[in-house]
Amino acid sequence: MHRWLWLSALVFAVDQITKWAVFLGMEYQSMIPVLPFFSLVHVHNMGAAFSFLAQAGGWQRYFFLVIGIAASLLILHMLRKHHDEPLMAVGLSMILGGAIGNIFDRVWHGFVVDFLYFSYQTYSFPAFNIADSAITVGAGLLIWDSLRRKQG
């Protein structure tokens, strides 16, 4: 199981390094266009995905902390159980690293630092970070693994 925790640690490290680079190197709510459809931004997310409950008055910080910690413990349990299944283990490890990255932000800052922003003409996707990306890719790998098992 320990070999998979290295992947979680790598996701956590890359997430935190990039967030600190944005936090220290960019003014809050600033934007640096990189491509016509992609910009680096510096925003703080008090809520969860897509700023869900961001304006809830502060209690959501602790709510999402508890959920994140509980999910991380469940993922650790699942990783211990499925450590010999590479696709599932990689997915779980990525989700764990991302979850811990966002938990760390909530404890340290009281919010999550987001900085990747995609838009096209009048359409835009809410800003996100490396942890969110790892969680999404990890979830996709779990779905793929599940579908692959059903077909096999």
Image (cartoon, rainbow, N blue to C red):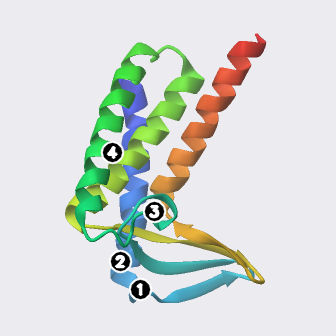
Distance (Cα) linking label 1 and label 2: 6 Å
Question: 69 or 56: nearer the eye?
Answer: 56
Above or below for 33 versus 124: below
Q: Residue at x 46, y 16 (%)?
A: 82
Mark 1 and mark 2 in contact? Answer it, CB < 8 Å: yes
> According to the image, label 1 marks what residue?
26
Q: Contact, CB < 8 Å: mark 3 with mark 4? A: no
Residues at badges 4 and 2 in contact (C-beta under 8 Å)?
no
- Marks 4 and 1 sit apart, C-alpha to C-alpha, by 27 Å
Q: Which mark is residue 68?
A: 4
Q: Which residue position is annotated with label 2?
A: 23
Look at label 3 and name its amino acid: Phe
Earlier-in-chain disc, 1 versus 3: 1
Q: Quadrant of the C terminus?
A: top right
> Could you give the CA–CA distance between mark 1 and mark 3, rounded to whole angstroms?
24 Å
Disc 1 and disc 3 in contact, CB within 8 angstroms: no
Query: Which residue is the site of mark 3?
Result: 52
Q: Where does residue 88 sit, x and y in percent of width and height?
A: 55, 25
User: For residue 90, which numbered disc appears in the image?
Assistant: none
User: In the image as oriented, which residue stretches furthest toward the top?
Assistant: 152
Circle 4 or circle 1, nearest the eye: 4
Q: Position of residue 39 (x, y in %)?
A: 61, 79
| Label 3, label 4: how far apart the Cα atoms are | 15 Å
Please report whichever mark, 3 or 4, sits nearer to the chain's N-terminal start.
3
- Looking at marks 4 and 2 on the same chain, the residue that comes earlier in the sequence is marked by 2
Q: Is residue 6 left or right of residue 40?
A: left
